[in-house]
Amino acid sequence: MSENDFGDLRRRDTERHLLAAVDESDNSKRAVMFLADFFGDSRNVFVTLLSIIPEPSEDFFPGEAERQAWLKEKEAGMQKHLAGYKEILLGAGFQAGQIETRLSIRPCTSIGDAILEEQEKLRCCIIVVGRRGISHSEEFVFGSTSSKILHHAKHCAVMVVE
Amino acid sequence: MAHPAETLQEDAVRELIARHAGPERVPARFKIITDTSDFFRVEYNDVVILGAVPYWVKRYEKEGRFGIDDEPKYWVRRAINLNTGATKILKLVFHEQFETTVGEVTIICFRSPKKEARILDLVAGHKNFMHGHWVLDAAGNIVRILEFIRGPRFDEVVAGYGADHHDYFHRYFPSVLDQYLELVLAIKLLHDHGEKHGDIRRDHILWDVDTKVNRWIDFDYNYQHGESMFGFDLQGLGNILIFLAGRGDVLVADLHRNQRELFDTLWGEDLSIAYKNRVANLKKIYPYIPDSLNRVLLHFSFGANIFYETTDQLLDDLARARADMVSLTGRQT
């Protein structure tokens, strides 16, 4: 699926459409396992597994070739994780037609904002994210994606799995 | 034996040096360098040719790091443009990656010539930034040629204001706050263009004695950010504001030693989240600080629950603080 092609996702208003925002971390895996456990036997639930890869600045690489190589490796790794998360849901009783995976590589200053943009486009009723449980100081300097989503999400529920 | 073209070039350079500094100052030996990849090869009195302009290299620059002796920056050289006689700063390419710690948080930082070159283009003509241009040397290194700024550090100027804090705060701080607001607006310009300063520290602001404004310097750092792209920059702005409002850092150890009655009123949440030996809740030390200003300071304290994510949020709160400073002191600036 391309960046701007949402297939029939917009028509899923009548379904319970969950957006699980994931990365390669353990807390993302925990969030997916929670979803599997909680909704595994629900037939009217649709899950989009979304991963955002922020395009890294050119400053971090000696040249464009190295940057592209990094992105390619990151994309391959993330696709593997998404496939693994899909397997977890299938193993819990989800049907293949209830799951969509979506990987977005894009310039973004905030992953939280990017997730919220996707939620708005897809019109999901629940955003599910894992939480790392970072320290106060760490949140001060780096910010927290789950806090950002909690504070800024509109027209949807937010489920934070710890 | 030297190549004829090289000899000719050296003769021409010798003549330029003689014209600039007098024949007696022409060094007996020096190198003409077009590839600056090995910046340690660039020595005092050498001449670096960049974009067909010869620069006569002088001393290297230094960087002070709070109480530690100034560290030499061998890749940053003062130099004289032999065509115009103007003093410039040459910043040669030095790829450095290191970790820095703020509180218990480790941040991976990069030194990026590309980033600094981009920002030099972006801030050309902006009064609150250092200016310069960049040139690719013979090996394709991005060498930045910076205009020399004459003047002391902003924090050193501020630390000398007033007989005591009360005097400073009522007579000088309104103007200092205005200057700080101008500096935050300059950082907002970077952020609005998706750029970070990357190394916001008070020794990276110089008071330009010629233009009478403060100017940000040294923006070649980048850092790996998380959710909050500008969090580290904002933390730097907060540290500077705490310094300015306190006319220096209010250190816990000093209070313990000299003002025990104030020390006894402090809680952990009153301290700076970045530096736990500094007080952020300055109203406990200086009760005349308006609540609106102190609330801004508390955003950078250990007790804060929400943090600034953008310069706009900080500027909104500072606008209120500024209004209260005008009411308190009767001074517009």
Image: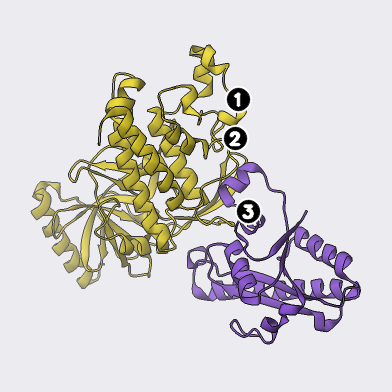
| Point 11% across, 59% down: residue | B15
Residue bearing mark 1: B267
* Neighbourhood count class around disc 3 (C-alpha, 10 Å): few under 14, some 14–19, many 20 upward: many
Ranked by sequence position, the earlier of labels 1 and 2 is 1
Q: Can residue B32 be seen in this view?
A: no
x%, y% of residue A32? 80, 66
Cα gap from disc 1 to disc 2, whole angstroms: 9 Å
Pick whichever, B179 or B328, lies toward us: B328
Pick whichever, A131 or B333, lies toward us: B333
Residue bearing mark 3: A144
Residue bearing mark 2: B303
Give amino acid for label 1: Trp
Local SS, label 1: loop
Q: In this view, does A88 lie to the left or right of A9?
A: right
| Point 86% across, 69% down: residue | A39
Give amino acid for label 2: Gly
Query: Is there CB contact under 8 Å for labels 1 and 3?
Result: no
Cα gap from disc 1 to disc 3, whole angstroms: 26 Å
| Point 89% across, 65% down: residue | A37
* Neighbourhood count class around disc 2 (C-alpha, 10 Å): few under 14, some 14–19, many 20 upward: some
Pick whichever, B288 or A65, lies toward us: B288
* Residue A66 occupies quadrant: bottom right
x%, y% of residue A50? 69, 72
x%, y% of residue B158? 31, 31
Q: Which chain is purple?
A: A
Cα gap from disc 2 to disc 3, whole angstroms: 17 Å
Local SS, label 2: loop
* Tint of chain B: yellow
Give amino acid for label 3: Ser
Q: What is the residue that sits farthest to the front in this orientation?
A: A14
Do marks 1 and 3 both belong to one polypeptide chain?
Answer: no
Query: Is there CB contact under 8 Å for labels 1 and 2?
Result: yes
